[in-house]
Amino acid sequence: MKPPLRTEDDRQAMVEGVSRGDIDVIVSAHDPRGAEGKRRPFAEANDGAVGLETLLSAALRLYHNGEVSLHRLLDALSSRPAELLGLSGGRLAKGATADLVLIDLEMPWKVEPERLRSKSKNTPFDEARFEGRALVTFVAGRPVYHYG
């Protein structure tokens, strides 16, 4: 990943920034890389990892452990990025594009790289246990993803 993972103090500072609203956008920077480019000495390894399939669940850890409110978290994942980019999505309103995600906030699951849909299976969350998962995703009112 670029930049690489930092210290626990850095992580805590970022969490506090999200909670306060000083950091107002969370992104995945989904950049999957195959095993051949990752299994090298650290300085020579390709940057990148799967992020799209784990972003929501990883972010929900902040909600489940009481560090960030659900409203603040979902705003940083959807509404605020859309607003900053001048997109009509990221909100529920009459006439707005029906880009929606149905989430089960409590659903437990374990990251099993071989079950990821991405072409690459490289993830920093290999075997991690999460609580919360996207069940259905709609883009412009059409379902484009169904869990299971």
Image (cartoon, rainbow, N blue to C red):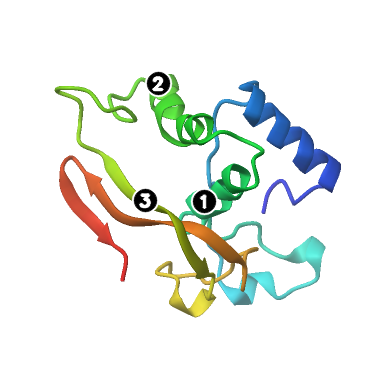
Q: Nearer the viewer, residue 51 or 16?
A: 16
Q: Name the residue beneath numbered marker 1.
A: 55
Residue 85: x %, y % from top left: 41, 23
Proximity of marks 1 and 3: CB atoms separated by less than 8 Å? no
Q: Is residue 29 visible?
A: yes
Q: Amino acid at mark 1?
A: Leu
Report helix, strand or loop for mark 1: helix
Q: How many marks?
A: 3
Mark number for residue 103?
3
Label 1 Cα crowd, 10 Å radius (few <14 / some 14-19 / many 20+): some
Of badges 3 and 2, the one in the foreground is 3
Residue 23: x %, y % from top left: 63, 26
Report helix, strand or loop for mark 2: helix
Q: Which quadrant of the figure has residue 33? A: bottom right
Distance (Cα) linking label 2 and label 1: 19 Å
Proximity of marks 2 and 1: CB atoms separated by less than 8 Å? no
Q: Name the residue beneath numbered marker 2.
A: 83
Q: Nearer the viewer, residue 32 or 77?
A: 77
Q: Residue at x 62, y 77 (%)?
A: 36
Distance (Cα) linking label 3 and label 2: 22 Å
Q: Earlier in the sequence, mark 1 or mark 3?
A: 1
Q: Amino acid at mark 2?
A: Glu
